[in-house]
Image (spheres, rainbow, N blue to C red):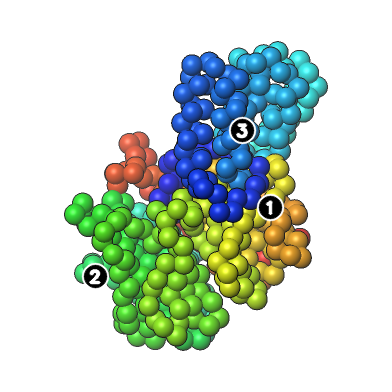
Amino acid sequence: MSILKNTPLFLSIACVLFGAETSWIEQYVQAATAANKTCTAKEFAECRTHLLRANEALGGRADIVYRLASVEASLGNKQAALDWLSLYSKSGLTFADPASEPEFEALKNTPEFAAILARLKSARQPVSSSKPFLTLPEKDLIAEDIAYDPAGGRFFISSVRHRKILSVTKRGKVTEFVPEGQPDIWAILALRVDSKRKVLWASTAAMPEAIGFSKQEEGRSALLKYSLESGALLKRYDLKTDAKHALGDMTVSSSGDVYASDGLGAVYWVEHSRDTMEPLFEKGTFRSPQTPALSSDETRLFIPDYSRGISVVDLATRKWKLLEHPKELSIGGIDGLYLKDRTMIAVQNGSTPPRLIRMSLDDSLTRITQWATLEANWPGLGAPTHGVIVGDQFYFIANSGWDRMNDDGSVKPGTAFEAPQIRHLPWVPF
């Protein structure tokens, strides 16, 4: 789950930035701050300039598009406002209702506005093709990640709140692979199986959502390497304590290399032959990197940023660029990302509504050509987190429980945990 899960979102059309003197993160912060200041002061022309700059710095989110529509309407630019609203209405997101906004009053009798409202109404309808596999036995697990061992025919589920790893057979029998209460094991986040080497990788981070959290340990994080056969901890890779870290997501290559993202900015690499963890990207390239996904030939790594979009990394050169995509597709707020051949599934829990989307890439794997919503707007979906490809099925965690938690680790007033569920749907290419 992203460390920035409650951070307000901005949106933009895809762009590519290489080697800029000012990083996109700095550009984003500067533009967002200036836009908020000038919009509040009703200096709309100046606000529009800053929003367009933020739009240039980011890739794949919907709220700047909506704010640009509002600003254009406030400036009396009806067609520009309708154009931005039309783009927002095609995103499948529904965090704002233009019918209730007074600044759009002059647009409400136009056929274009009626079409926008019709698309938004359609976007609020339930969408689901998944089926339940298992309801987990503990309601307050905060189930974060799921991995699968084909040799043993079992799933593994990580628990943030209870700091443990569950093992689940395909018949649904649940046992504890790593029991709660292990020393120096904090919230368990990412999981990946290396079946060839009989290893289960896990990441752990000291977070307030975990029972027994100690403020003195906040920001500590480590990568854990377990034996699939015995459950023994084979090795531990701790990050330095000179800064806060939160190793949250990872993937493993066929050669045994591990790529792990730190939700606070960096991406790490454990090269199998060297067996040491070192930065693949230091902080500054990404703001909140999430689940990395490898291309089939393992030459490229796709890294979603919770604040931005998806970057494509050439692993030989470590050069990167944003994955191009249709203008209406909003790909901020991605937590889980999965790729097989040219088909990609993303779990977006930083969007309204939370959803799963399927995307198709072009032959060069540099552009999204098609996309569709797979799961959205049904009560049991809750806050989905991660998934795993098993044969021709995609298994994912629904109703994880993250949406019941405050950032300080307390349960939101008036809410109660409900049991997380593992669901599955066909992995179908476009």
- Can the viewer see residue 377 in this picture? no
Query: Mark 3, mark 1: which one is toward the viewer?
Result: 3
**Label drawn at residue 324:** 1
User: Does residue 330 appear to the left or right of 37 in the view shown?
Assistant: right
Which of marks 3 and 2 precedes in the sequence? 3
Seen at 49% across and 16% down, the residue is 41
Pointer 2 local density, CA inside 10 Å: few below 14, some 14–19, many at least 20 = few
Label 3–label 1 contact, CB within 8 A: no
- Can the viewer see residue 290 in this picture? yes
Q: Secondary structure at mark 2?
A: loop
> Three-letter amino acid code at disc 2?
Gln
Query: Mark 2, mark 3: which one is toward the viewer?
Result: 3
Which of marks 2 and 1 precedes in the sequence? 2
Q: Secondary structure at mark 3?
A: helix
* Residue 110 % position (x, y): 78, 18
Pointer 1 local density, CA inside 10 Å: few below 14, some 14–19, many at least 20 = many
**Label drawn at residue 52:** 3
- Tell me: residue 318, above or below residue 103: below
Occupied quadrant, residue 267: bottom left
Q: Give the Cα separation between the discs numbered 1 and 2.
A: 44 Å
Occupied quadrant, residue 419: bottom left
> Three-letter amino acid code at disc 3?
Leu
**Label drawn at residue 182:** 2
* Residue 266 % position (x, y): 43, 59
